[in-house]
Amino acid sequence: MLAGKSVSLENVSMAFGDFVAVRDATLEIEAGEFFSFLGPSGCGKTTILRLISGFNEPTTGIVKIGGRVMAGIPANRRPTALIFQNLALFPLMKVWENVAFGLEARGVDKATRRKRAGELLELVALEGQGEKLVTQLSGGQRQRVAIARGLAVEPAVLLLDEPLSALDLKLRQKMRAELRSIQKETGVTFIYITHDQGEALTMSDRIAVMSQGRIEQVGSPDAIYRDPATAFVATFVGESNVFLGRIVEAANGVATIETRFGRLSGRNPEGLATGAEAQLVVRPERCRLATDQDPLNRLTGQSRRVDFEGSFINLVLELDDGREIVAQLTNHGEALHITPGEAVSIGFPTEAALLLEPGASTGA
């Protein structure tokens, strides 16, 4: 098994002229961890990957791998391997030659290269494919060749820059499981860059969510989804219904805000005070059809559509200001009988909602 190493960023910033791509990034990635940077295009995640790999040096701050400061160490001398989005395979080389290319560059003899390539092709479930040209392989097979080539040089850290983006949905889903399996089997630290929340939530031990060059939150997939720390994380990771208002009551970790739709209550982990502006976020799957006995967190709107998804249903309501909210309901049958234009009330428990400081999100 290969050995992974930790990666540390200490107050790392990267500027290109007047443009700051990464701002004061500080985090610790553990050895052998599958760690993902998640965020929209232009948020700085690929720049961080290039800083770790050595293709860029930070404007300020320190990058460490395995506790060793990387300042001044070029990319070819770092214990890393980088898999690009376009894979960068050589079309006129055989599969095994692609896998062994990095070993050849290091002066490893052909017999050893061939043997190591065969071992890695077996690891990525491509045994017997070594004599083919990469052009004879499917998209998913070429992806596995790129991973094997990255592992051939025995990196402590494998860096992956949106490697699944060119694949179709079913193949992406299959490759997620395969990547996770390979990472666990090798023990190499994987650092994965993606704008696809499904990839990050499915594969990662932990995730750093980024926006405009800043790390907004670091945590496990469950924590990121269940307890978003900022308005941006709440709306970028998963779907949320968002309501703006001012806090009128706050006590014992719970607060109530006055909104244009009435009073709504939720958890208040940051201790926002009475009188402060806040936004309440609640996931669609935590909403339910309301009854007359629901005293709090009740919203009434006109049914716009009922989207049938098999085991669940997305009920879309239009509120009196024209905005739409969504309740994701288990398919028990009753929601299928709701007609367009019908007045419908939904509600949610206080513990299902979260109060955050207003920020980069959508709401009303």
Image (spheres, rainbow, N blue to C red):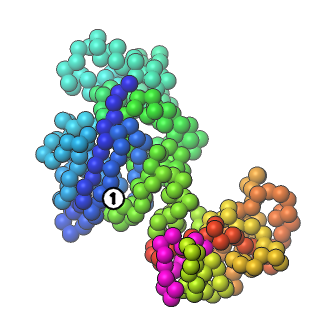
Q: Indicate the quadrant where residue 321 lies.
A: bottom right
Q: Nearer the viewer, residue 225 or 72?
A: 225
Residue 240: image location, x then y, percent: 59, 67
Residue 90: image location, x then y, percent: 33, 30
Q: Nearer the viewer, residue 179 or 66?
A: 66
Q: Is residue 85 visible?
A: no
Q: In the displayed image of the protein, which residue is found farthest to the top?
A: 111
User: Could you tell whether 353 is left or right of 197 in the image?
Assistant: right
Image quarter where the N terminus lies is top left
Would residue 291 be counted in the magenta stretch? no
Residue at image coords 28%, 64%: 23
Residue 286: image location, x then y, percent: 68, 64
Range shown magenta = 266-281
Look at mark 1 in the image and give the residue it sits on: 44
User: Could you tell whether 266 is left or right of 122 in the image?
Assistant: right
Residue at image coords 23%, 46%: 64
Q: Indicate the quadrant where residue 313 lies.
A: bottom right
Would residue 271 be counted in the magenta stretch? yes
Q: Is residue 186 visible?
A: yes
In the rendered view, tell whether residue 70 sits above or below residue 211: above
What kind of residue is marked 1?
Answer: Gly
Q: Indicate the quadrant where residue 15 lies.
A: bottom left
Residue at image coords 47%, 22%: 126
Mark 1 crowd level (few <14, some 14–19, many ≥20, 10 Å Cα): many
Residue at image coords 23%, 49%: 63
Q: Nearer the viewer, residue 242 or 353?
A: 353
Q: Nearer the viewer, residue 320 or 155?
A: 155
